[in-house]
Amino acid sequence: MSANDYTPESDEERDFLASYDPTKFPAVGVTVDIVLLTVRQGRLSVLLVQRGGYPYKGMWALPGGFKNPDETLDQAAARELMEETGVTELEGHLEQLKTYGDPGRDPRMPVVSVAYVGMMPEASIPSLAAGSDASAARFWPVGDVLGGTEGDQPPLAFDHEDILRDGLERVRAKFEYTTLATSFVEEPFTVADLRRVYEEVWGVELEPRNFRRKVLKTDGFVTPTGDTVNVGRGKPVELYRRGGGATLHPPMLRPDPEGS
Amino acid sequence: MSANDYTPESDEERDFLASYDPTKFPAVGVTVDIVLLTVRQGRLSVLLVQRGGYPYKGMWALPGGFKNPDETLDQAAARELMEETGVTELEGHLEQLKTYGDPGRDPRMPVVSVAYVGMMPEASIPSLAAGSDASAARFWPVGDVLGGTEGDQPPLAFDHEDILRDGLERVRAKFEYTTLATSFVEEPFTVADLRRVYEEVWGVELEPRNFRRKVLKTDGFVTPTGDTVNVGRGKPVELYRRGGGATLHPPMLRPDPEGS
DNA sequence: ATAATAGTGTCTCTCAGACAGTATGTG
DNA sequence: CACATACTGTCTGAGAGACACTATTAT
């Protein structure tokens, strides 16, 4: 049952709700932050915005903003994503990740941030016009932002590096038992395209023939279009679209599983 | 990097933070709600409290309460759990589940609730003295609360039925690739004890010999104590404790996997 | 022809499902 | 004794890792 259609059952309760004073509870800000991932030029990349005001002025941060009381969390995430990227129809995937509420994570006030993870093919991102409170927005290769010892990228604002790491692990884990990897490629795509997404996200190399067998034998992963294209030299490549299925049975486990 | 040690880098920023007015952002209440699960008398059960005030007065709800600005979300969940159950040291597991923020989910005011899932053996719950704002607290078999067509239990308050369903699915999924099921049994335990936990949570029957083989062959799942006990009639039973491992490689998949 | 890439087929090992048989207790 | 439960071992089929081979294109 949903609570949205709540109706008081007595005059007593009606009076209670009418005279209720919300200010007696500790009020905090609630924001949504988005880890939007895509694969550009073969590199897994995350959308960051440069902060135009204090705090962390000039540093890079995940896109996000305050949740409105009259919208759901999912709607707030989709709205913020639209405002930052211009993406209207979401050819991709957006799901709630985790909520962060450590005291002091925002020096201005207590803020609880509901983080989301999104993934989409590069071509579905039209403009990347910077939003109102961000002086710039662009994709950064994840490797440069996190483990980057080469060019010393500035660390992310707030606790956004933690959020990014958690988002990455979520995506890597979900690749094992869902068809989410298809959200990163544009249709139509080849099996090799899909494999390169797996390899980039997992940071490993996969055996092309075994990967192909797994993908084609799993019902609902991809559906053949019947078309082929010639790309470079070599045999013509068969093209596919996303299948209807969402989960992989049995899962495709990552190589070198750590732990136990 | 953690944001808790944030220090302004200029006088300009210091002035900005000092004069910052948090009230210009939409303030909402942030609560934590807890799906605390245990297995009592062979039945998977969830801790519920009966509401003593409006709204949903007299109905059963998940335990929870408001987050304090000076504590983390994990601390808030542990504190609320302690206040409701008296559990101080957590012989079990507590993890963040999902955040719920639909408009109107609390008729009093906009409330965003960060839900947690906890699991513990029954014996580690001492008293169950009802908290301040709850007139009663007890465990209910999950089957009676959700699918119960037998005795018509009243539905849960707010959107807590959704939260309970999500929590259940989280636990069921995690049983496949983690050792979390050991959180439900008291030490020392038998392999059959652990199997009955799986069977009750998944709602299926498992082949005892294959289950035993899987558990004992998985490194870090359980560690033998060397002791045995006589329980009822039959061969003496070997006793085990929880192993150090957290994950199962490869996973133990549920029978009858739906989807794709 | 040569190189390069796509696609097919095969062998082997691991592991889960099914199930027979043995061991050791209680009534 | 019968009976119940724990524990051991075997057979089989599904599926993943490794790898040889064929097909088709561009240069």
Image (tube, coloured by chain):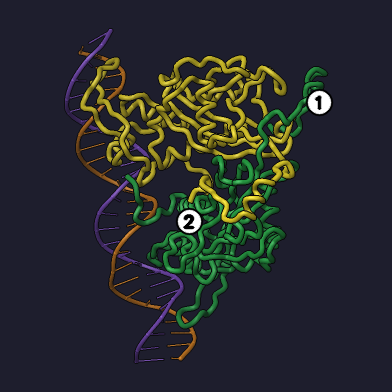
Chain colours: A green, B yellow, C purple, D orange
Q: Amino acid at mark 1?
A: Ala
Q: Position of residue B248 (x, y in %)?
A: 36, 43
Q: Residues within 10 Å of mark 1 (few under 14, many from 20)?
A: few
For disc 1, the marked residue is A18
Of B237 and A27, nearer the camera is A27
Q: Residue furthest front?
A: B11
Q: How many numbered discs, if any?
A: 2
In space, the residues marked 2 and 1 are separated at their CA atoms by 56 Å
Name the residue: 52% across, 43% down. Answer: B258
Name the residue: 80% across, 24% down. Answer: A19
**Circle 1 marks a residue in which chain?**
A
Q: Residues within 10 Å of mark 2 (few under 14, many from 20)?
A: some
Of D21 and A201, nearer the camera is A201
Of D10 and B128, nearer the camera is B128
Quadrant housing residue B161: top right
Q: Position of residue B153 (x, y in %)?
A: 63, 20
In the picture provided, is B193 more to the left or to the right than A185?
Answer: left
For disc 2, the marked residue is A218
Name the residue: 39% across, 33% down. Answer: B206
* Kind of element beneath mark 1: helix
